[in-house]
Amino acid sequence: MKKLIANREIDVNEEGYLVDFKQWDREVCECIAGECNVVMTEKHWEVVEYLQDKHHKEEPLSIRGIKKSGVINIKEFYALFPGGPLKKSTLIAGIPKPKSCI
Amino acid sequence: MKNLVILGAGTAGTMMANHMIKKLPKKEWQITVVDQYKTHYYQPGFLFLPFDIYTTSQVKKNGKKFIPKGVNYIQKKIELIIPEANKVELENGEALNYDILIIATGTKIAPEEIEGMFGPEWHKSIFDFYTYEGAKALRNKLREWEGGKLVVHITEMPIKCPVAPLEFAFLADSYFKNKGIRDKVDITYVTPLGGAFTKPKATKALHHLLEEKGIKEVTDFNIERVDYENNKIIDYADTEVDYDLLVTVPTNMGDALIERSGMGDDLNFVPTHKATLQTKNYENIFAIGDATNLPASKAGSVAHFEAEILEDNILRYINGEPLKEEFDGHANCFIETGGGKALLIDFNYNHEPVEGTFPFPGIGPLNLLKESRMNHMGKMAFRWIYWNMLIKGISIPFVSATMSEKGKHFEEVK
Ligand SMILES: Cc1cc2nc3c(=O)[nH]c(=O)nc-3n(C[C@H](O)[C@H](O)[C@H](O)COP(=O)(O)OP(=O)(O)OC[C@H]3O[C@@H](n4cnc5c(N)ncnc54)[C@H](O)[C@@H]3O)c2cc1C
């Protein structure tokens, strides 16, 4: 599926998650964040980088993992990405929605 | 003489002892199994114990009875694995050397992970049913409970037998109906997942059942703490759920032994190759069952499918042949839905639970993803199969380790 984000055609799945990380950049990120009513701050960028790093190392993402991230605690994570913080932050970071393991 | 050492004599360890004794030449190999307990529990029975459907004696037996002759059984706590030295240390300083090691130490609950859970109200108004003690304490509580808010709760994923909490909610609905007090009980199902189950297709079917039975759902709930003084669970988004009786599945973790040995992930699960069952860090150490970090369900049926493949791979490893990358995450679970009915689901790493018939394509007699009495009979028969076939390593007729695609209506996992 194609979606117009930051005036570009970006490949996404039915839930809007990017399929190809190469299409992600700061501009795309800010656009998606805007759709989620999130305004990117320094801290948001830090979290996004942390998530992308974990994803590229193929380490699974979880709320428990956030606790040990050293970047942010869970309370702050909820405050930065209100609602479903893992779902929202991964959408914004351009990586797949974490599979809640079986 | 060479040594094969198996850590844990639960479902998977007992099965592996039974498999390997038949395959390894007795003159060359000594097989040793270590477990801390005398009793082998039938854990699927912990779901039925609270509702007085099973008695305590139906869910436990002397573990040694299931260890085959010729296998050395040691009942001791395991202190440490030292992979660099191919050595395991037991509680009194005794050491075991191994040529091949199988880790089958399972997973257990860790209620101390959540503030307020493992406190003064533990087993008073806050219960688990994942342990024998918890299930029995809950049975005694339910016998005299007169109603109120029952909250059935999952702390975090992964948990073993991920459908068990749902089944608990369904059975609770039946139990209180039979007691004639269903109108006095409010049942809420609280989960960190976005829906009733981890797989979308099954979630739909299960959501429908919850609705039908008047069980409320609270999803995406990541618990922060239990406020046991005010009978509330509170999540990180400050959502609160009130309870009178909280039945929770606490965080599931691998045994502390794995952490002490520096061999686990965040939750003490052992990083394991998902198709071969060899551990990622040591080529002569294999892992099976709930102790692994595989993205498959933690269930006895899964351990059973894994055992057939692990047996093969250990023999291949001994012969210096390449390992078979065969395990596909196959899981097969009955879901008890109350009122003498059950559902059956069959899925693997790549396929969603599907509709169809099992084990014979087009015939059944079991129905996949549909409630039926026959499925319930299957679930009840599972206890007999468990004690008499499963842990003895006897393969179950017509059910293969890798998933069959015949007679099923498929959808790929994206
Ligand atoms: C309520 C409930 C319902 C379930 N329902 C089903 C179902 O319907 N179908 C199904 O297929 N599965 C079901 N399961 C899951 C199933 O019981 C487990 O997946 C299965 O028992 C896993 O086997 P295992 O050998 O990996 O672990 P276990 O059987 O738990 O065995 C681990 C063993 O290792 C030993 N051990 C651990 N650490 C040490 C140590 N340091 N020293 C010495 N010994 C140690 C333990 O004493 C234990 O005996 C259910 C589980 C529960 C709790």
Image (cartoon, coloured by chain):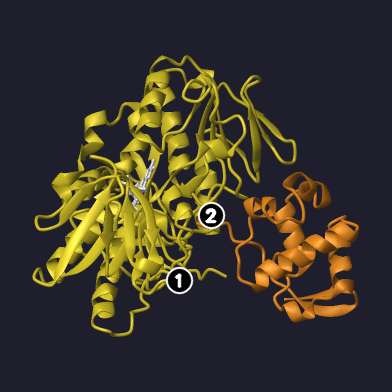
Chain colours: A orange, B yellow
Between label 1 and label 2, give the one nearer the viewer: 1
At x 47%, y 65%, the residue is B271
Left or right of residue A39, residue B67 in this image: left
Q: Of marks 1 and 2, which one's residue comes earlier in the chain?
A: 2
Q: Position of residue B139 (x, y in %)?
A: 37, 24
Q: Nearer the viewer, residue B92 or A98?
A: B92
Q: Looking at this view, name the residue that lies furthest to the bottom.
A: B321
Other-residue count near label 1 (Cα within 10 Å), few / some / many at <14 / 14–19 / ≥20? some
Disc 2, SS: loop
Is B27 above or below relative to B161?
Answer: below
Which quadrant holds the C terminus of chain B?
bottom right
Residue A44 in sight from this viewpoint: yes
Say if B156 sits above or below A97 in the image.
above
The residue at the point 27 percent across, 45 percent down is B76
Residue B332: x and y in percent read: 36, 57
Residue labelled with disc 1: B281
| Apparent side of residue B285 relative to residue B123 in the rendered image (left or right) | left
* Three-letter amino acid code at the position of disc 1: Asn
| Residue type highlighted by circle 2 | Thr
Q: Is residue B324 left or right of residue A92?
A: left
* Label 1, label 2: how far apart the Cα atoms are: 29 Å
Respond yes or no on whether mark 1 lies under 8 Å from ligand 1: no
Q: Is residue B180 above or below residue B131?
A: above
Q: Which mark is residue B21?
A: none
Residue B198 circle label:
2
Judging depth in this view, the residue of B73 and B304 nearest the camera is B73
- Is residue A40 something that shows in the picture? no
Q: On what subunit does the disc labeled 1 rest? A: B
The residue that appears at 52% across and 20% down in the rendered structure is: B183
Residue B22, horizontal then vertical, whole percent: 13, 66
Q: Quadrant of residue B242?
A: top right
